[in-house]
Amino acid sequence: MSFENKTIVITGGAKGIGRACVELFHSQKANVVILDVDADQGTALANQLGERACFILTDVSKESDVIAAVEQIKSLFGAIDILLNNAAVQYFSTVTGSTLEAWDQTFAINVRGGFLCAKYMIPSMQAKGKGVIINMSSVQAFVTQRQVAAYATTKAAQVALTRSIAIDYAPTIRCVAICPGSVDTPLLRDLASQSPDPAAVIKECEDMHLMKRVADPLEIAEFVSYLASDKAAFITGQAFRIDGGLGIMIQGSKQE
């Protein structure tokens, strides 16, 4: 697929799924804008890609950062065609065990960040008469594990936000959500490293999926690319699970 003359903004684009999407869209001739708080990796990635790629240091939870980024994007590339709300954080805790600060930070990045980016980029799409917003949710919007109360709640909120954007801005703008299972990203590795046996955690993640592995970030990026393209022009308001079968089988003893 080609996205020539299209501009895509990818939040959390310096690492993991975001980075895979940046690299794929750039290879498909898009203008790619990386928004991230990691200046070193974001700058290095933009420099590696060269022409048609830029990095803007942005905390998506801060309205002033998002507004400034949008103005810079418009000055560089003109209209914004596609927004991928991918930036996210996760920590382990129950409702009673969570601090208010950690809860609020998770919502600020995972939910407020997507809201702010949509709020300030939708007018550019409307002016052009067409646009696509993709929210990177999670399978944990539907099925979840213990001790991820804040993360799971934000991922469900992203699905609700997807529906609202799709309804309010149709037919000009399409909005969809992607809900991956476990993906081999720095975030997954970092969370696993908090365990005394990180390798066992990764193996447990693999075994939870019917495919007996976690996804490669490029597998998610390929699906993002399809949904962003005109091949998916009749798709909006939906949340798509790309989860290797995670959560569809009831665990229990075998009966012959």
Image: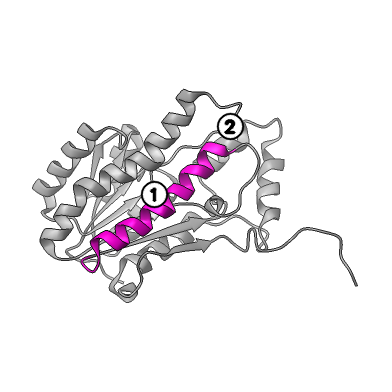
Q: Is residue 57 left or right of residue 205?
A: left
Give the main secondary structure of the magenta stretch.
Answer: helix
User: Magenta span has 77?
Assistant: no
Instruction: Name which residue type carries label 2.
Output: Val
Near-viewer residue (157 or 44)? 157
Position in image of residue 138 (x %, y %): 50, 52
For the residue labelled by badge 2, is the local secondary structure a helix, a strand or a loop? loop
Determine if the magenta segment contains residue 149. yes
| Image quarter of residue 133 | bottom left
Relative to the observer, which residue lies in front, 183 or 230? 230
| Disc 1 secondary structure class | helix
Q: Quadrant of residue 112?
A: top left
Q: Amino acid at mark 1?
A: Gly
Give the image location of residue 38, x and y in percent: 35, 34
Which residue is label 2 attached to? 95
109, 12: nearer the viewer:
109
Q: Nearer the viewer, mark 2 or mark 1?
A: 2
Label ID, residue 18: 1
Question: Which mark is on residue 54?
Answer: none
Considering the image in quadrants, where does the N terminus appear?
Answer: bottom left
Is residue 107 visible in the rendered image? The answer is: yes
Q: Residue at x 82, y 59 (%)?
A: 252
Q: Residue at x 37, y 56 (%)?
A: 162
Q: Quadrant of residue 57?
A: top left
Q: Earlier in the sequence, mark 2 or mark 1?
A: 1
Left or right placement of residue 96 versus residue 254 in this view: left
Locate residue 206, reporting x and y percent: 66, 53
